[in-house]
Image: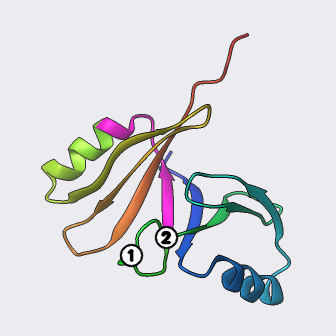
């Protein structure tokens, strides 16, 4: 089976403005999670994949939507990206208790992120 999309995320400099705009267009439900860089607004559309909105961590990052694709191994996928002429932007980065992600740019300039879910607890 092909790799599925895992998550879709908007990075913006105006978190509340984006929430107001998208709330007026779509019937999304919101849940706020605290982060070091400010709140993360999880979007629940009622179906998968889910989404989120976060404040861009640096002022030079332009607002953009990012698609996360499910993979079994973020590190191995990013190595393959390099072998195929892509550029890794963010190396494998863990999100405690959730999983890990990384981002890359393909040789044509397109950006994408990959997501590896944390193993399920057997406790």
Does the residue at mark 1 contact the one at mark 2 (Cβ under 8 Å)? yes
Residue named by callout 1: 61
Q: Would you say 44 lies left or right of 74 here?
A: right
Q: Residue 109, labelled with which disc? A: none
The stretch of residues the image draws in magenta is 66-75
Crowd tier of the residue under label 1, counting other residues whose Cα lies within 10 Å: few below 14, some 14–19, many 20 or above: few
The answer to whether 34 appears left or right of 11 in the picture is right
The residue at the point 20 percent across, 59 percent down is 87
Mark 2 burial class by Cα count in 10 Å: few <14, some 14-19, many 20+: some
Q: Secondary structure at mark 2?
A: loop
- Judge whether residue 72 is colored magenta: yes
At 45% from the left and 35% from the top, the residue drawn is 72
Q: Which residue lies under the disc numbered 2?
A: 56
Where's residue 115, x and y in %? 49, 46
**Toward which corner of the image does residue 121 lie, by quadrant?**
top right
Q: Is residue 91 above or below residue 96?
A: below
Q: Nearer the viewer, residue 3 or 75?
A: 75
Residue beneath the point at 82% across and 73% down = 28
Marks 1/2: CA–CA distance: 6 Å
User: Is 92 located above or below residue 54 in the figure?
Assistant: above
Instruction: In this rendered view, identify the residue nearer to me: 59 or 8.
Output: 59
Say left or right for 23 vs 3: right
Scheme of image coloration = rainbow
* Quadrant placement of the C terminus: top right
Q: Secondary structure at mark 1?
A: loop
């Amino acid at each position: 089976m092909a790799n599925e999309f895992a998550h879709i995320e908007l990075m913006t400099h105006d978190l509340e403005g984006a929430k107001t705009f998208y709330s007026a267009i779509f019937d999304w439900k919101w849940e706020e999670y605290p982060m070091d860089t400010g709140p993360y607004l999880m979007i629940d559309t009622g179906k998968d994949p889910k989404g989120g909105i976060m404040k861009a961590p640096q002022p030079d990052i332009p607002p953009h939507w990012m698609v996360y694709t499910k993979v079994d191994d973020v590190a191995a996928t990013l190595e393959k990206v390099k072998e195929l002429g892509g550029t890794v932007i963010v190396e494998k980065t863990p999100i405690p208790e959730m999983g890990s992600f990384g981002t890359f740019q393909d040789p044509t300039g397109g950006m994408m992120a990959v997501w590896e879910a944390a193993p399920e607890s057997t406790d």
